[in-house]
Image (spheres, grey):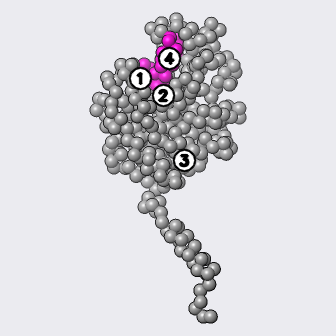
């Protein structure tokens, strides 16, 4: 009969309308031109691979961002860039130095977590170092006083009742430089990537018992995301999208199915490394699952970091959570992931 609509036609029409509606709906940023964002992250070994993986999989671009991601060795330079406004945010860098800066009036806030566990371990090449306590009277390579590697090393030694006054700390620089010094025997002990634990004999060193910081300092938040109050106020949507991209990266890399993509990125970041070296990084991530897939950091975690600063006398007192952090952007970022 003319004009009769069958049940099948009705269902097809309804599903088509629903599809059209879902396709037509998209957030305003998705239809706009890509938003520029400048990000400064720490330049450690694993961070370089993660940066290559981020570029390879275009996670930032998937949130319509046009990123300029800088890998910076000096955390104070990252902080200077964020405070000065030349950098929009840091997404993967240590933030222990933020608390004393905020105490002195810097208008910055922590937005979420990156690596929740320290990715370092304490190594030695000396036969007479068989415990952390044996480092009393020895020379230990670190970064400058107050730097991330220094703070981690001293915190670990204090946990195991080492008399810090009996340890000679030598400023060598980044963890990669410290590890080379330990391997060469120019210092008695020092930090290196925890991913190298299985391969330590190859470098004529070994893990000191209880020296794995990924196991021993689980409350120490190794890296996080942070930005200035001004950027949070003026570019909140951009920062939320960037946080979502990093959460997407963290979820992706901790899924065993991402192995081939990760190894491809590692080969890009370290062209002269062996396939075995690439596998070591992958094994570390799958063993420890260090990344903050849901981004948010608890008040307890930030209090732990501040308590350490107070004990190191680089911060006078513990500041209120709301003064040092804003986790609302992380919550909004997770919503974008569905």
Please rate how many residues cluster around mark 1, counting C-alpha atoms within 10 Å: few if below 14, some from 14 to 19, many from 20.
Answer: some
Secondary element at image label 4: helix
Residue drawn 63% across the image and 13% down it: 125
Q: Is residue 10 above or below residue 293?
A: below
**Nearest the camera: 116 or 191?**
116
Secondary element at image label 1: helix
**Count of all numbered marks drawn on residues in the image:** 4
- For residue 308, the mark is 1
Q: CA distance from mark 4 to mark 2?
A: 13 Å
Whole-percent x, y for residue 16 in the image: 57, 74
Cβ–Cβ under 8 Å for marks 2 and 1: yes
Q: Is residue 142 magenta?
A: yes
Please rate how many residues cluster around mark 2, counting C-alpha atoms within 10 Å: few if below 14, some from 14 to 19, many from 20.
Answer: many
Q: Is residue 107 left or right of residue 219?
A: left
Q: Is residue 86 visible?
A: no
Whole-percent x, y for residue 39 in the image: 45, 42
**Nearest the camera: 200 or 56?**
200
Q: CA distance from mark 2 to mark 1?
A: 9 Å
Q: Is residue 153 magenta?
A: yes
Q: CA distance from mark 3 to mark 1?
A: 31 Å
Magenta segment boundaries in residue numbering: 139-162
Residue, disc 2:
220
- For residue 248, the mark is 3
Residue, disc 4:
159
Q: CA distance from mark 2 to mark 3?
A: 23 Å
């Amino acid at each position: 009969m003319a004009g009769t609509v069958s049940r099948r036609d009705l269902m097809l029409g309804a599903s088509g309308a629903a599809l059209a509606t879902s396709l037509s709906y998209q957030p305003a940023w998705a239809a706009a031109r890509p938003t520029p964002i400048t990000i400064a992250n720490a330049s450690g070994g694993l961070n370089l691979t993660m940066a290559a993986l981020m570029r390879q999989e275009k996670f930032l671009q998937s949130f319509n961002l046009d990123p300029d991601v800088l890998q910076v060795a000096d955390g104070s330079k990252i902080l200077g860039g964020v405070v000065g406004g030349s950098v929009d945010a840091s997404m993967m860098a240590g933030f222990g130095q933020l608390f004393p800066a905020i105490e002195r009036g810097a208008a910055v806030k922590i937005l979420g977590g990156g690596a929740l566990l320290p990715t370092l371990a304490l190594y030695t090449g000396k036969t007479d170092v068989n415990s952390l306590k044996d480092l009393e009277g020895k020379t230990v390579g670190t970064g400058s006083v107050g730097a991330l590697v220094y703070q981690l090393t001293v915190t670990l030694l204090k946990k195991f009742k080492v008399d810090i006054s009996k340890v000679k700390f030598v400023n060598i620089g980044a963890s990669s430089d410290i590890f080379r010094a330990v391997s060469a025997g120019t210092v008695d002990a020092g930090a290196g990537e925890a991913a190298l634990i299985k391969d330590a004999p190859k470098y004529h060193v070994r893990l000191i018992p209880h020296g794995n910081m990924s196991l021993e300092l689980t409350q120490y938040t190794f890296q996080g995301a942070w930005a200035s109050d001004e950027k949070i106020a003026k570019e909140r949507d951009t920062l939320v999208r960037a946080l979502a991209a990093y959460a997407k990266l963290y979820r992706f890399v901790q899924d065993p199915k991402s192995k081939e993509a990760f190894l491809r990125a590692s080969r890009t970041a370290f062209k002269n490394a062996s396939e075995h070296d690439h596998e070591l990084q992958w094994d570390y991530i799958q063993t420890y699952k260090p990344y903050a897939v849901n981004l948010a950091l608890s008040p307890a975690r930030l209090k732990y970091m501040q308590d350490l600063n107070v004990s190191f006398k680089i911060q006078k007192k513990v500041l209120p959570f709301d003064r040092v952090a804003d986790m609302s952007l992380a919550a909004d970022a997770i919503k974008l992931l569905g």
